[in-house]
Amino acid sequence: MTVLDSVKDSLEMGPSGDRIESHLHPEGSFDVEDHAVPTGREEIWRFTPLRRLKGLHSDAPLDGDAFKVELDLPEGVTGASVPVSDSQRGASGLVPTDRVSARVWEAATSVLELTVPDDYVGDRAATVRVVGTGVDVASAGHLLVRAGKHSRSTVVVDYSGSATWAENLEIVVEDGAELTFVAVHGWADDAVHVVNQHASVGRDATLKHVAVTFGGDVVRSDTSVEYAGPGGSAELLGLYFADEGQHIEHRLFVDHTAPKTKSHVVYKGALQGEGAHTVWIGNVLIRKVAEGIETYEENRNLVLTDGCQADSVPNLEIETGEIEGAGHASATGRFDDEQLFYLRSRGVSETEARRLVVHGFFNDLIRKIDVPELEAKLTETVEAELSKNMSVLTGATENGVPTA
């Protein structure tokens, strides 16, 4: 039996012989025709600006090559583009749950497979750089990251340039492995990126999944996690900053499919500029077999100017009462007036006070990422984002001209 056959069988029947269904996640299918072209009235598409997807959700050809991929791998980690027929595509259990993902599955001719061997302990991150070279041609890709048993590694996927990019991304964390996976969306302002990510976390394995999103015109990331054995742990962290006219959407689904598993989700975002829009959907399903699990999810949004919109929707679906704990929190607000007053009363200018508050908002999350080579870069990026519109934040002017 091939990996794909196994995935299709598991889609049809659950462990008990019953068909797996959830109110929080659409039914999956590899057939594009099983996924109607979205209209925007569907629950999973109602926040997405479909007209700005450049046809990725409908019929844009996905055979373009307006991108290049660069690998920077430490010794012992391997990466290669493999024809679909010889690949391990589907090893994570990924099954397309929307039309874009199904179209990418159908269009893919190869899979970029990144493999961390068993018992490997890395001293630096393995990096995949995806560089877009134009938005006029729609392109598609499939990436599979596999962390071998009892390995400890970090993988960074760094996106930049201009692209219209649809992608399926699989993560397999085998038994006892520890993987930190970081996706940095540093696209140019005109880029469109729709990515469907699926992770399988093995017995007593640990996944730290980090999404950092600053660039792009429209970025929609759909991330799901399931457990291949008891004792697995998943920590999902997200940091995003939306500017004028930018749409950033993160959709998460943690499927507790095994007992004694854990999940912890923390996403933080800031918005500034007219038409800046962020969406965070946090879905957690605790199945009947998932006794003794722990889960918590939270989303915090800091609105820096007028004209922004932050949508935040946490959901829990619980099928057993035998759990250790489950909860969620969501908040959207402006600057904390008490924090600003405290800083201003000690001689800190309003501009600098606002900078400090925003940096404090993000810094604890940056430290949780715990990838030293990224920490300085992320702090600098937050500062650069603030500098874009600091005059808008303070309303400061000099002779009628805004000043930073």
Image: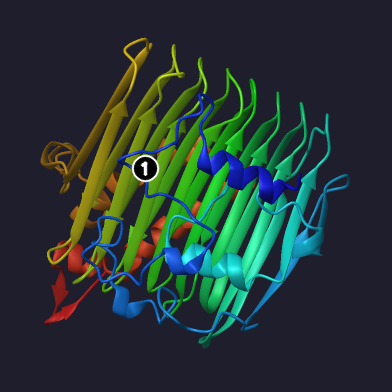
Residue at far right of view: 75
Q: Quadrant of residue 148?
A: top right
What colouring does the structure picture have? Answer: rainbow
Q: Is residue 186 above or below residue 26?
A: below
Residue 382 placement (x, y as % from top left): 40, 56
Residue 341 placement (x, y as % from top left): 12, 40
Please give left or right for residue 213 compared with residue 342 in the image: right
Residue 329 placement (x, y as % from top left): 24, 32
Q: Is residue 169 above or below residue 180?
A: below
Residue 203 placement (x, y as % from top left): 64, 22
Q: Quadrant of the C terminus?
A: bottom left
Q: Residue at x 42, y 60 (%)?
A: 98
**Does the rendering let one see residue 93?**
no
Q: Residue at x 41, y 25 (%)?
A: 287
The local crowd at label 1, few if under 14, some if 14 to 19, many if 20 or more residues have their Cα within 10 Å, is many
**Does the rendering let one see residue 59?**
yes
Q: Is residue 195 above or below residue 7?
A: below
Front-most of residues 129 and 165: 165
Front-most of residues 222 and 366: 222
Which residue in the structure is indicated by mark 1? 267
Q: Residue at x 59, y 47 (%)?
A: 8
Residue at far front of view: 17
